Image (spheres, grey):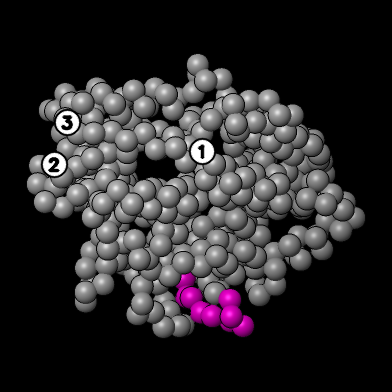
Amino acid sequence: MKKVFVGLSGGVDSAVAAHLLIQQGYHVECGFMRNWDASVNSDIAGNPTINDDLCPQEVDYMDALNVAKKLNVPLHRVDFVAEYWNDVFSVFVEQTKKGLTPNPDILCNKHIKFHAFVDYAKKHGFDYVATGHYARIVNVNGEAHLAKAVDHNKDQTYFLVQIPKEVLSMTLFPLGELVKDEVRRIALEQDFVVAKKKDSTGICFIGERHFKEFMTNYIPKKPGKIVDIETKKVLGEHHGVMFYTLGQRKGLNIGGDRGPWFVVWKHLKSNILIVAQEHHPYLKPTSATISRVNILSDSLSFPLECQAKFRYRQADQNVVLDVVEGQLVATFNQGIKAVTPGQEAVFYLNDICIGGGQVDEIFYQDLPLRNWVEKEIKDEI
């Protein structure tokens, strides 16, 4: 009987994943990952940032314990607080300070769920690890590949793109063939305490907190001007350019009768947030360089026509990948909105995820977008 170590988060998806693996005849044990400690993870003044009484992590642990008892399987409480702080949250904060828009869930999957958790599983004699992610592992010519879930609306391969390729062959995603409604139905049939629990949408392992206010524990507010790139008029004030992302519409509080505004650039040196209206060409860059590349297929050759997502749940975009002077370049002459430095570019050949990396520099008509923007607002900066 093969042994599977299941990441049990205290949510409905991982509970059903563990149940399905038991039904399939595996020997199942579960692990709850403890990754945040308010007494250790303090703010810039050295004060704990989260009140333990309010921390959703303990609520999740009790829910996971309830599910494990219901399934009659052991639950390991595994501590990765130091790893999470060093490899995920600190990186997230430092990159945000630089004006980038990193994705903590991608970092968490890479360093915690599919590295530290996998290492723990191997040391304790498990053959496989499993999670409640909506994704699939498919075999193509004897090689394990990461593939989109059957439920494309819930597909989470975007967040899994940085996991090590060698881990794919020992990973199980039991929910990959199911749709969300079916998962809920199974949870209700099994009378899991989490059957009607809502899905988490907050920062990985920290919970659903007001993002901007939470981040001010680590990055001080630095108010500055919001400037219209066309008229050069000051439209309002921001709280700090690092708290915004390219293409962002909500939360600018500048309104007016000219229609919606979008962030076109963040100029850190002058602390100016530059905005434009939807028609502006700079909102749709035409290429990007990609760093921190993780390739998940051995059979790629360049140039390569494929599809890409530059944010979660974005419709697949046609791109051409090539290697130029040792760096991966994605070209999309049609222009794509909200391609953002720091975010992840994830590449697909139909349903197979072939890899991805962090957006480094974005370009408009073969010149860095920053050059175009700085030329437009040279008098303001």
The residue stretch that appears in magenta:
317-327
Label 1 neighbour load within 10 Å: few <14, some 14-19, many 20+: some
Above/below status of 264 relative to 260: below
Q: Nearer the viewer, residue 63 or 101?
A: 63
Does the residue at mark 2 contact the one at mark 3 (Cβ under 8 Å)?
A: yes
Q: Identity of the amino acid at label 2? A: Ile
Taking 39 as reference, is 30 left or right?
Answer: left
Spatial CA distance of label 3 from label 1 is 27 Å
Give the mark, 2 or 3, whose residue is nearer the N terminus: 2
Label 1 residue SS? helix
Residue that extends furthest to the right in the rendered view of this protein: 379
Q: Is residue 115 left or right of residue 256?
A: left
Can you identify the residue that label 2 sits on?
22
- How far apart, in angstroms, are the residues tagged by discs 1 and 2? 29 Å
**Circle nearer the N terminus (3, 1):** 3
Q: Secondary structure at mark 2?
A: helix
Residue 22 at x, y percent in the picture: 13, 41
The mark that comes first in sequence, 1 or 2, is: 2
**Quarter of the view holding residue 201:** top left
Residue hosting label 3: 71
Q: Is residue 253 visible?
A: no
